[in-house]
């Protein structure tokens, strides 16, 4: 999927911020600028699955972070486990003492994280049904090389991949790969939108999804674009009159930016999204703080 196109805006390279959305003309307040596509991958957390529609999302009511070397090694091990599962499904012998088979069985027997399984499965199915669109949509997004917050998180993703490999129909095994599962994890870190009950700041956090076109919006602590989930897609509109060449920005903080100071906002954005915010508001407040001693 190519970047979103519109008479109202263009997607351009922003120094220090990757891609961003720039107004092609003056845009009046309350104008809708984008309606996103459905997500290319998503998950509804287990505790909400009996209460939330899987299609439209209607709701009825201090650890070690693995580095890239550790991630590569663990996924290499997961590939071996998955390969062993595929071989064992076509091998009628009882090689019970084979070390590789024992290791693979341990991965499948490990605790199941149904949320990660569901997220990876949704992305795998999307890739199987629309491989060209998946590549255009997902592989053009910003990737986080170290998306796992803890070693446990990495283990859960790798075990989920091995578990899927053990049960996936043979026709889907070409799509259930380490490369695809790693890409899904890498894009979720910076490009996922939360699925909440009600509005953006709804108290029930029910899951998340990756929306490629919506991921072109950069963050500002004084955003000029608001968003609202409508079923399984997102609507974005400008909250003030926008001038030509202004960047269209949303808030990644879900409204919390209104009550946080610059140190708190920057700290949260650095921790979760991995960047130090240099929006006009942060620069202004940081300078005022320095000038005030």
Image (cartoon, grey):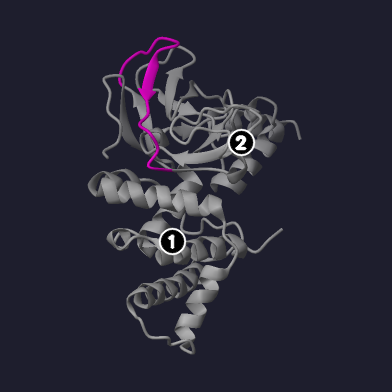
Q: Is residue 99 left or right of residue 178?
A: right
Q: Position of residue 215 (x, y in %)?
A: 41, 37
Q: Is residue 41 left or right of residue 206?
A: left
Q: Residue at x 68, y 38 (%)?
A: 263
Question: In the depicted view, which residue is nearer to us: 152 or 222?
Answer: 152
Report the residue marked by disc 1: 164
Q: Position of residue 147 (x, y in %)?
A: 51, 55
Q: Residue at x 46, y 58 (%)?
A: 145
> Is 33 drawn above or below residue 4 in the view shown?
above
Name the element at disc 2. strand
- Residue 220 colored magenta? no
Q: Residue at x 31, y 19 (%)?
A: 8
Report the residue marked by disc 2: 205
Residue furthest bottom in the image:
97
Q: Residue at x 44, y 74 (%)?
A: 81
**Residue 112 seen anywhere in this rendered image of the structure:** yes
The image's mark for residue 122 is none
Of discs 2 and 1, which sits in the foreground? Answer: 1
The prevailing secondary structure element of the residues shown in magenta is loop
Residue furthest left in the image:
132
Q: Quadrant of the N terminus?
A: top left
- Few, some or many residues within 10 Å of mark 2 (<14, 14–19, 20+): some
Name the element at disc 1. helix
Q: CA distance from mark 2 to mark 1?
A: 26 Å
Q: Image quadrant of residue 194? A: top right
Instruction: Name which of mark 2 and mark 1 comes first in the sequence.
Output: 1
């Amino acid at each position: 999927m190519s970047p979103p196109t519109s008479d109202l805006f263009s997607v351009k390279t922003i120094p220090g911020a990757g891609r961003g959305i720039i107004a092609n003309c003056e845009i009046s307040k309350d104008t809708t600028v984008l309606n996103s596509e459905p997500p290319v991958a998503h998950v509804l957390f287990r505790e909400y699955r009996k209460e939330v529609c899987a299609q439209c999302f209607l709701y009825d009511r201090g650890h070690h972070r693995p580095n890239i070397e550790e991630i590569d090694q663990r996924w290499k091990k997961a590939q071996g486990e998955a390969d062993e599962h595929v071989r064992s499904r076509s091998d009628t012998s009882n090689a019970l003492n084979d070390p590789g088979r024992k290791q693979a069985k341990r991965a499948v027997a490990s605790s199941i994280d149904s949320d990660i399984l569901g997220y990876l499965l949704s992305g795998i199915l999307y890739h199987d049904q629309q491989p060209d669109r998946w590549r255009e949509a997902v592989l053009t997004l910003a990737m986080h090389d170290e998306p796992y917050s803890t070693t446990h998180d990495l283990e859960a993703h790798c075990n989920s991949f091995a578990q899927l490999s053990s049960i996936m129909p043979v026709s889907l095994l070409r799509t259930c790969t380490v490369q695809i599962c790693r890409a899904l994890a890498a894009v979720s870190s910076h490009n996922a939108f939360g699925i909440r009950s009600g509005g953006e700041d709804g108290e029930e956090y029910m899951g998340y999804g990756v929306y490629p076109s919506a991921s072109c919006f950069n963050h500002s602590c004084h955003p000029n674009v608001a968003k609202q989930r409508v079923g399984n897609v997102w609507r974005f509109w400008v909250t003030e009159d926008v001038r030509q060449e202004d960047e269209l920005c949303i808030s990644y903080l879900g409204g919390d930016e209104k009550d946080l100071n610059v140190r708190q906002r920057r700290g949260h954005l650095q921790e979760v999204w991995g960047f130090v915010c240099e929006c006009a508001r942060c620069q202004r407040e940081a300078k005022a703080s320095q000038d005030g001693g």
